[in-house]
Image (cartoon, grey):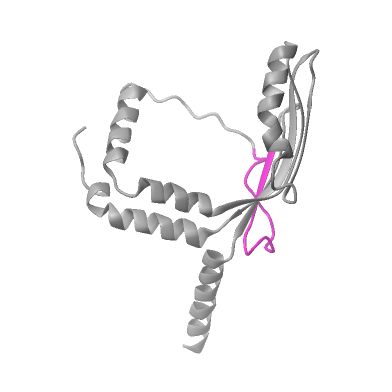
Amino acid sequence: MATALGILLTLLVAVVLLALLPWHLRFRARTAPAEVRVDLRLLAGHAPAIPLTGGKRRDKPARDRKKRPATHRASRHLRRLQQMQGVGALVAGLLSAFRLRDLELDGRIGTGDPADTGTLWGCLTPLIYGPGQAVRRIEIVPDFAHRVFEFSAAGTLAIRPDRVLGTGLRFAWVNRGMLFSRGPA
């Protein structure tokens, strides 16, 4: 009896720690050659890494059933989302649950046309030289002579699962009648 109670208490503490401590999603990606690596570290980044990419990609067999056009499905979902309350609070709550840490971005951009490359470079300068340099290091170099798009990025995305869960539960509570009823198709 005491052993079962100890195991149950240990599991309860583990679940609470997993829900309250941030999860760290560490990523590394580059365009040439194309490569993406993503690892999840629980318990504020102190747990061993759980690789989320790197496995063999399997192609799924095509389904034979006929589907409605995507525009019809999207418009139906958009109408239903517009009828729901608190969508802005949902988006704001989800955005507050994510924090980008330790971003390193190196790259070279060029459109082949010097004028277009300069315009693109001008649009990117607030991102490169703007506030928040303590959290990120961004070095993007324009190439006015060639058409090139090469990037390498690495960083950590901290996710607060308690905020994601709380925001989702608040949204579901406010829209409880709308979420579980079948509307007109």
Q: Is residue 160 above or below residue 71?
A: below
Tell whether position 171 is magenta.
no
Name which quarter of the figure residue 138 lies in.
top right
Quarter of the picture containing the C terminus is: top left
Residue found 27% across the figure and 48% down from its top: 179
Left or right of 111? Residue 19 is: left
Residue 65 visible in this rendered orientation of the protein: no
Q: For the view shown, which residue lies furthest in the left direction?
A: 184
Name which quarter of the figure residue 10 lies in.
bottom right
Tell which of 59 and 76 is nearer to you: 76
Residue found 74% across the figure and 30% down from its top: 151
Q: Where's residue 149, x and y in %?
A: 72, 22
Q: For the view shown, which residue lies furthest in the bottom direction?
A: 2
Tell which of 87 and 151 is nearer to you: 87
Residue found 26% across the figure and 41% down from its top: 83
Q: Where's residue 84, x and y in %?
A: 29, 45
Left or right of 63? Residue 96 is: right
Q: Is residue 10 above or below residue 162?
A: below
Q: Where's residue 3, x and y in %?
A: 52, 85
Residue found 50% across the figure and 30% down from its top: 60
Residue 107 visible in this rendered orientation of the protein: yes
Tell which of 138 and 151 is nearer to you: 138
Q: Which region of the structure is painted magenta?
A: 35-55
Total marks placed: 0
Left or right of 142? Residue 162 is: left
Tell which of 12 and 157 is nearer to you: 157
Q: Is residue 74 above or below residue 138?
A: above
Tell whether position 53 is magenta.
yes
Q: Where's residue 64, x and y in %?
A: 37, 22
